[in-house]
Amino acid sequence: MKKIISTGILIMLLSLTLTACGNKNDAGGKEKITFVLDWTPNTNHTGLYVAQEMGYFEEAGLEVEIVQPPEDGAAVLVASGKAQFGISFQDSLAAALAGEDALPITAVASVIQHNTSGIISRAGEGMDTPKGMEGHTYATWNGAIELATLQEVVEADGGDFSKIELIPSTVTDEVSALKTNSVDSIWIFYAWAGVKTELEELDTDYFAFADIDPVFDYYTPVIISGNKFLEENPETARAFLEAVSKGYQYAIENPQEAADILCKAAPELDAELVLASQQYLKDQYQAEAEYWGYIDTNRWNNFYNWVNENKLVENTVPLDTGFTNDYLPK
């Protein structure tokens, strides 16, 4: 289902588009914005599609094109200015924000207020706690931060991380992987894969990283933008994020209608799963924050402190950088 093309090809295509259109759309005089997703359309993206469908972007004087991600994500395209906004994650941004070759990008909004990821397994097999993963298989992407997170929670629970059998992840459907016993435990984002297990009546055990240690309550996903674009076009950035904020507020207040809008934009999606996921996320997009998109400085820094202390990226991630709330509507 995932549609990924090479960064080079996507940059070339976007360059041709921008060259032809300039900064303004010749027909309507609207400012052109390109937004790069992180995956195929799903309920993390609903606010974008609502803003497009309900005319919020048009009201803001914007023409927004939502495009599929390249192989290595949105960050390079956004940093190069070939796209003005995109979706990334605080954990995967760590390396991008560190060192002399740090990408000139900034997180400008949190899509979901808290980290909803954790480990899911078949119910009754003892993996309802991190220690219980001993002697079982875990499908891994072999990411440094991923494995360090897992090791931290397992050892904090008195477990031995070395007793977990790590197998390369080929999981495309978490429910099928668990039902066929091809893997015992999987890292998921509950709003999609967890909800899907409920719909398919698969009994599972689950623990969330943020419930175990607040250091793992980092921001995932986030909307990013290029520093040069933000510096040169602050009012455009504010107009875009105001429209997006209205889209997510609509999704919070109208999950059924928002689900319908997402399914209209991506008819290949399972409508029942989309609605169930939308019902789950309506309380997660903003949660207790004063306004949608807010990024808390302490939570942002706490996670990167942990990354730095454990030397999980080559260079030290600077604190108090890489994010801002300045462009969000208050």
Image (spheres, rainbow, N blue to C red):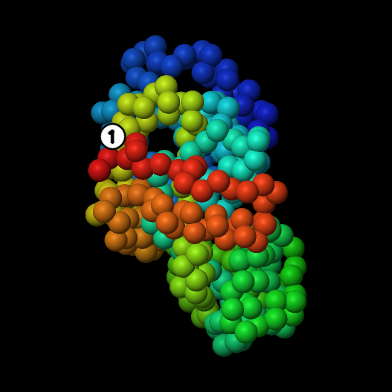
Quarter placement of the C terminus: top left
Q: Is residue 280 left or right of residue 188?
A: left
Number of on-image labels = 1
- Give the class, few, some or many, for how many residues have Cα within 10 Å of label 1's Cα (few <14, many ≥20): many
> Which residue is at 28% across, 28% downward?
60
Say which residue label 1 marks.
56
Amino acid at circle 1: Tyr
Q: Is residue 216 left or right of residue 284?
A: right
> Which residue is at 64% across, 78% downward?
155
Q: Quadrant of residue 244?
A: top left
> Which residue is at 61% across, 26% downward?
11
Do we see residue 112 in this rendering?
Answer: no
Circle 1: element type: helix
Nearest the viewer among 128 and 320 is: 320
Q: Is residue 72 left or right of residue 79?
A: right
Q: Quadrant of residue 10?
A: top right
> Which residue is at 28% across, 50% downward?
291
- Against 238, residue 173 (above or below) is below
- Against 302, residue 67 (above or below) is above
Nearest the viewer among 159 and 138 is: 159
Do we see residue 13 in this rendering?
Answer: yes
Q: Quadrant of residue 140?
A: bottom right
Q: Position of residue 146 (x, y in %)?
A: 63, 61
Q: Position of residue 214 (x, y in %)?
A: 46, 67
Q: Position of residue 271 (x, y in %)?
A: 41, 56
- Against 59, residue 314 (above or below) is below
Q: Position of residue 317 (x, y in %)?
A: 59, 48
